[in-house]
Image (cartoon, grey):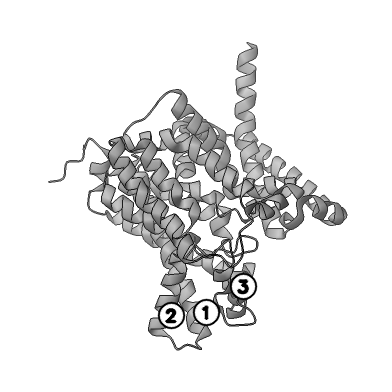
Amino acid sequence: MINRNLATAEDRARLPIQRIEVVYFAILLVLLAAVFAFNAFVAGGTISSVKQLAIDSASWPYPPQYWGIQYWPAAINRVLFRWIIQGTWTLFCAPDDAWGFYIIFIAWSFALFYGTLVALYFFLRLLDFSRRMSFGGCLLFLACAPVLLAYKYPVATREDPLAYFLIVLGLVALFKSRPILFTVIATAAALTRETTLILPLAYFLASGESLRQRVLVFIPPVLAFFGIRLVTQAPVPVNQLEASLLNFLFPWELIAFLFCAFGALWAPYLIGMRERRQYNDALNFPWRVLITTGPIILVLILGTSVALGRAREIRPTFLIFPWVIAFALDWFSRNRAYLARLAARKTFWVFAFSIFAGLAAIVLYFNYAQRELTTAILADFRNGYWLVLGTINLAITLALFLPRARSKWLAEQV
């Protein structure tokens, strides 16, 4: 008979999958299919057609299987996802089958996104979240702009679902103290995206193992990182600063896209991380890992996103989603009573709607009455989808945290 009062989150995670979890995974499958359908048939991005996939992979006027972006200096070393896609296509399709390549690209992308959702669920369970809260964390992942508009310009997702999947798997392996498995995952991640080196860094900082073992685990991903650069040398030197300089030509666009990476989750994430560190409140080893590594991972990812690439793509910034969702969920859990009181007040809903209506009116005015000025300030953010998402997330943030800030201010005056 299963002991229902197991002492650790890991013990609970080992319980057989419950019927409700099967329901959760089925719902997530349907919702992810809806996200892909939205990107394919409504948003008009990379997966909307064979031609668009060819354009976004820098292949056009050649078919998408040419994968022209593999020759770009900034992307030439991100080989693992391309090997998977092109290897599958070679096995099952004719050399001129562009449609087959398109289907395989979508199928693998969908499978990796879904794998990320399932892995994220168990990642959150190891952090001692309930089944319902873990499911809620997966819903937050789907609601984030880099997923909801994964294939819309300027996000244009390619190898990123594989990177997301490996990041979560690597953290789970770290939580379970599986150094060999972790090393394999981190090495694969290094061949997917360079910024996934946050995985071996997290192990080095927080594993608690001897210095010798931490170094041994750290070396293979770093060797893979540099080794692939020797094998696939860029045809011209890479000037990483060239792209980053464009960030500062449009600083408001930079801020807007960075905000949209997590939207309304930024505030609970940052507050939750600060509170956990301030009170040194680590319930178990997985939480100690996140608390120890959280600030430095945030600084590194934001720094590389802004200083070494175009931050408006928001995919590199989104790599910290396991930390963001965990700390945000934790804040929601700790402030359940506050959120319940807000939701029970009609005045709150009037207040929230008023904030959204006010922001929407401002956005509509500038988008249509001051179009040239808006374009000059926001550049590519001046797009219906991004303006709508930004407005909704900013309204949620203000509605949740302005009353809290006011209450704290009044308490300090007493």
In front of the other: 327 or 314: 314
Whether 162 is drawn above or below 378: the answer is below
Local crowd size for mark 3, using a 10 Å CA cut-off: few (<14), some (14–19), many (≥20): some
Residue at 64% across / 70% down in the picture? 44
Whether pointer 2 and pointer 1 mark residues with C-beta atoms closer than 8 Å, the reply is yes
Instruction: Name the amino acid, label 2.
Output: Trp
Q: What is the C-alpha distance between the residues marked 2 and 1?
A: 8 Å
At a point 43% along the width and 23% down the height, the residue shown is 279
What x and y, as percent, mark residue 117?
41, 56
Which residue type carries mark 1? Gln
Q: Answer few, some or many: residues within 10 Å of disc 1's Cα (few below 14, many 20 plus, some between 14 and 19).
A: many
- Report the Cα–Cα distance between label 3 and label 1: 10 Å
Name the element at disc 3.
loop
Give residue 37's mark: none
Q: Which residue carries the number 3 mark?
A: 58
In the image: residue 405, left or right of residue 323: right
Is residue 75 rendered to the left or right of residue 222?
right
Mark 3 or mark 2, which has the lower sequence index?
A: 3
Residue at left offset 49%, top offset 33%: 272
On screen, residue 294 above or below 391: above
Identified by mark 3, the residue type is: Ala
Asked whether 32 or 242 is in front, the reply is 242
Discs 3/2, front: 3
Q: Which residue is mark 1?
A: 65
Where is mark 2, residue-wise?
89
